[in-house]
Amino acid sequence: MNKFLFGSKATTLERLYARLNLGKLCPQLIVEKRIWDESASSIVDRIRKSFFGEHLAIRSSAFGEDSEKESFAGAYTSILNVEPDPDRIETGINTVFKSYESTDQRHQVLVQPMVKGVAISGVVLTRDLDTGSPYYVINYEAGSGRTDIVTSGKDSKTMLLHRARPYRLKS
């Protein structure tokens, strides 16, 4: 009953939001392919109203991109720092959907405000992907202010922390 269920990236973040005690997630809007195809302009209006005047991150959230067993982090296009202009938003969302190379109507795009003042960004996994060992695997980058270093495959740092000993993290 307490088992966490993974979905798309967007759905997983939505589910995670309800479970967080100390962390903070960005506000988000989920754009579903089937609805986008029917009413793109009204979705663009909703995005502009929700994130009034803010630059946006238009992120991939393909069906099957992330799951309990595997991750395709960085496999699809995400577009950062999108100006809050209707044409740029529409072009960005279309570009992300096209990167999936599939017309599956379950695909999604995740829209969030662009994060500012980033000190450290990264990805946390709850198991080592190669061995399945019970470690928190923390891939991170500090100092550039960018949020796409880790998922783009560029140089980042990795820290392993055994899940039974999270108190060992001193940094």
Image (tube, rainbow, N blue to C red):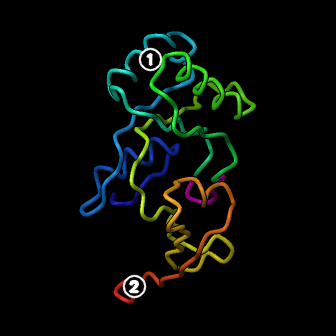
Q: State the residue at coordinates (38%, 21%).
A: 48
Q: Residue 139 lies in what quarter of the image?
A: bottom right
Task: State left or right for residue 128 relative to residue 126.
Answer: right
Q: State the residue at coordinates (42%, 63%).
A: 119
Amino acid type, callout 2 = Leu
| Quarter of the rendering occupied by the C terminus | bottom left
Q: Tell me the residue that label 1 is attached to.
A: 43
14, 158: nearer the viewer: 158
Magenta range is 67-72
Classify 104 as above or below 127: above
Q: Residues within 10 Å of mark 2 (few under 14, many from 20)?
A: few
* x then y, percent, for residue 94: 63, 23
The alpha-carbon separation of the residues under discs 1 and 2 comes to 42 Å
SS assignment at label 1: helix
First along the sequence among labels 1 and 2: 1
Q: Tell me the residue that label 2 is attached to.
A: 169
Amino acid type, callout 1 = Ile
SS assignment at label 2: loop
* x then y, percent, for residue 98: 70, 28
Q: State the residue at coordinates (50%, 17%).
A: 35
